[in-house]
Image: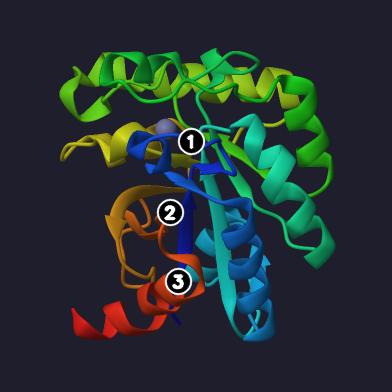
Amino acid sequence: MKIPILMYHKVGAPVQSRPDTFLNVSARSFGRQMRLLQRMGYQGITFAEAAAGLRGDLKMPRRPVCVTFDDGYVNVREHAAPVLDRMGWPATIFLPTGYAGRANEWDRQYGNPILPIMDWETLRGLQEAGWEIAGHTRSHPKLGEMADEEAEREMRAGAQDIAERLGSAPQTFCYPFGSHNDRTPGLARQCGFRAACTTRSGLADPSADPFRLPRVKIAYRDDVWGLLYRLWIRPRLS
Ligand SMILES: [Zn+2]
């Protein structure tokens, strides 16, 4: 069993220059990609469900696919949630809790576009609709470059914020920037998470380390052919 864990960030964010295409897909491409997957027999599940399926704790649909959104941009609520709603698919948001209701201010130093992030009320609505709101620390640091105690504090703080605001502790986690070192996955486990994903590319299977699960990164130019290439051709080349 191989589970594609799709990695998206922004959906339908305005594109005026090249940096606006980074970690962004158009609303049209996103809709076409989801409808293609559905026609191919895929069924959307959350990342926590995918992780439980990989452990053998949960029966998986015949063709599971996991849609994840890093950072919780408002444009995901605007452009991606309606598409997924119509299909009856949930998704997973990795939320840097300190920025809920604010914007991706950590990106300012990299010259990336600054866009609003969902507030807690919106996130609660998605959670009630079956979405998973998962850990991504509180302040979106590079965990792999921090002292262990500091990294652990960041992961716990994010989990606590989610537990307080949404009623239950998150089960899964995603390393901001994909940054982790040899010890970070163990720290995530200690913080109570059951699985974590990286930005490394590939399909997840039961032999993978549950705290280093790979994802399939979808780029602005991909549309449906790029998605097919990334799901079906590229994994067979490596
Ligand atoms: Zn992030």
Q: Which residue is label 3 attached to?
A: 227
Q: Which residue is label 1 attached to?
A: 192
For disc 3, the neighbor class at 10 Å (few under 14, some 14 to 19, many from 20) is: many
At 47% from the left and 62% from the top, the residue drawn is: 5
Q: Nearer the viewer, residue 159 or 72?
A: 72
| Cα separation between marks 1 and 2 | 34 Å
For disc 2, the neighbor class at 10 Å (few under 14, some 14 to 19, many from 20) is: some
Q: Position of residue 157 (x, y in %)?
A: 49, 16
| Cα separation between marks 3 and 1 | 33 Å
Q: Is residue 197 left or right of residue 56?
A: left
Q: Which residue is label 2 attached to?
A: 220
Query: What is the secondary structure assignment of the residue under circle 2?
Result: loop
At 43% from the left and 30% from the top, the residue drawn is: 191
| Cα separation between marks 2 and 3 | 11 Å
Q: Mark 2 or mark 3, which has the lower sequence index? A: 2
Query: What is the secondary structure assignment of the residue under circle 3?
Result: helix
Q: Is residue 52 above or below residue 188?
A: below
Q: Nearer the viewer, residue 4 or 24?
A: 24
Q: Nearer the viewer, residue 52 or 228?
A: 228
Amino acid at circle 2 = Tyr
Q: Quadrant of the N terminus?
A: bottom left
Cβ atoms at labels 3 and 1 below 8 Å apart: no
**What number is the disc on residue 130?**
none
Amino acid at circle 3 = Leu
Q: Position of residue 96 (x, y in %)?
A: 50, 24
Nearer the observer: mark 1 or 2; the answer is: 2
Nearer the observer: mark 3 or 1; the answer is: 3
Res 77 visible: yes
Nearer the observer: mark 2 or 3; the answer is: 2
Q: Mark 1 or mark 2, which has the lower sequence index? A: 1
Amino acid at circle 1 = Gly
Q: Position of residue 127 (x, y in %)?
A: 76, 40
